[in-house]
Amino acid sequence: MMYKKRSMAALLCLALGTTACGGGSGGSAPALGSESAVQAKKDPVQLTVYFPFPADWPEENFMETFGQPITKKFPHVTIKYITGGKVADLITAGETIDILFASIGATPPHLMENKLEYDMTPQIKKYNYNLNSLESTMIDTARQLAGGGIYGLPVYVPPSATYYNKDIFDKFGVPYPKAGITWDEMFELTKSLTRSDGGVNYTGFGSSYGHLAFMNQQSIPLIKTETKKAAFDTDERWKSFVDNLARFYKLPGYSHIKNNQISEPNERNRFFKDRTVGMFLALTALHNAKEIGDMNWDLASFPVYKDKPDTGPQAYPTYFYVTSMSKHKDQAFEVIAYLTTEEYQLPQIKDGKFLTTLSNKTLRQSFGQNNPMYTGKNVKAFQPDKYAPAGSVNKYNGSYNAEFNTIVRDVVFNNKDANTALREAAERVNKKIEETEVASGAK
């Protein structure tokens, strides 16, 4: 917004850095201090925050990145952080979780299967929260998951980029991946890099097929929301998607890799630890200085399809949710809303702690400015100019996207044709969904 003059209320909103100023419809917010202005209660309150995976956000890192900024902004709030353990066990033990955060893929088993989902629409309206400040496809994803409502706000998103080992490219005289690289061009680079040298087997490409399927650039549904059936055997685009990825592992130089070694952890270790992989498609996390070590590395854009050269993968954001069991929903929402402000996000972006979910793309240019590991690196590649639209989003996608790994393994290692592998995967998924529905008493 470029106005020559601003109202005092608008200036106050800017000073406070609050997303409660400015509604999703573009209407003006009530002036601060007026009788119509709404603020959460400022009575002392403890909010318990839960995250499923301790290795990703140990308590010290969580408090530094999230907890301390929250309590500095809201002195009346104290944060209790719990990570790991089963949500059901915590609830049974009498724990009340106010805020749960998880990736879109991890949301169903941790939030929804424990019946902790809560539609935050009342708080969004009450505090005049501006949803337009967030990247649109991430809001579309949230709305699909909540059947038109919204359970959580996206706070950060993992990269959609190619890490590459420059030393391997240099060793074999292969040009580095370029901006706007297509899948076919990446395949040609992979062929050039996949070889044995000095008793070491090098491969050109590694990634996580389950996440690639979940985030596919064509927005192909995994599970159709309206039918609760897998789309593997009914949407013909899946065959070309399988064929595109399986061809990498069908290269002769991949024959030393076993069929249980193409999961994301194995691929990641071969790239960062063993350093025998030329390119690694990062989809789940930013990789830190300790993991990268002294590797001679850089970044390239996520490969695109020739017919969609401007479209990256779907986003895979991490959402922060107010839970249905919280007795402090307004205060919890206020905290989550703050985590989506430029005031909060900009320092984290500059430090290279996470990638933004905000619609203001100029923020991306600040990524890693204060972090020496990103000096001279092509950090622009971390996020596509345009995320693909959300495919069908529902509580089953996160549970069954791993079936795609089985499909690829069947095609590569078990010599099944793609149609057979897709049909068999669909049968397995549909059976599991039906059993789950019966067990839960769903109609």
Image (cartoon, helix red, strand yellow):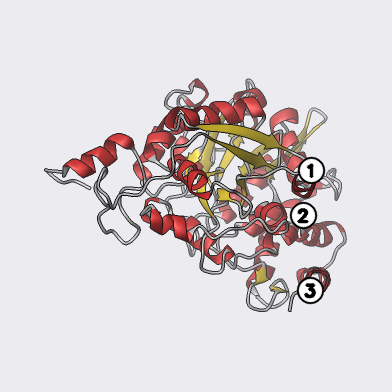
The residue lying toward the viewer, choosing from 308 and 382, is: 382
Please name the residue shown 61% across and 42% down the image. Answer: 282
The residue lying toward the viewer, choosing from 377 and 114, is: 114
Q: Which residue is mark 1?
A: 93
23 relative position to 410: left or right:
left
6 relative position to 403: left or right:
left
Q: Could you tell me the amino acid type at mark 2?
A: Lys
The residue lying toward the viewer, choosing from 360 and 306, is: 360
Q: Residue 162: percent from the left, percent from the top?
A: 57, 42
Element carrying mark 1: loop
Q: Is residue 318 visible?
A: no
Upstream in the sequence, badge 1 or badge 3?
Answer: 1
Q: Which residue is mark 3?
A: 441
Q: Residue 280: percent from the left, percent from the top?
A: 64, 41
Q: Could you tell me the amino acid type at mark 3?
A: Gly
Cα separation, mark 1 vs mark 3, equals 26 Å
Element carrying mark 2: loop
Element carrying mark 3: loop
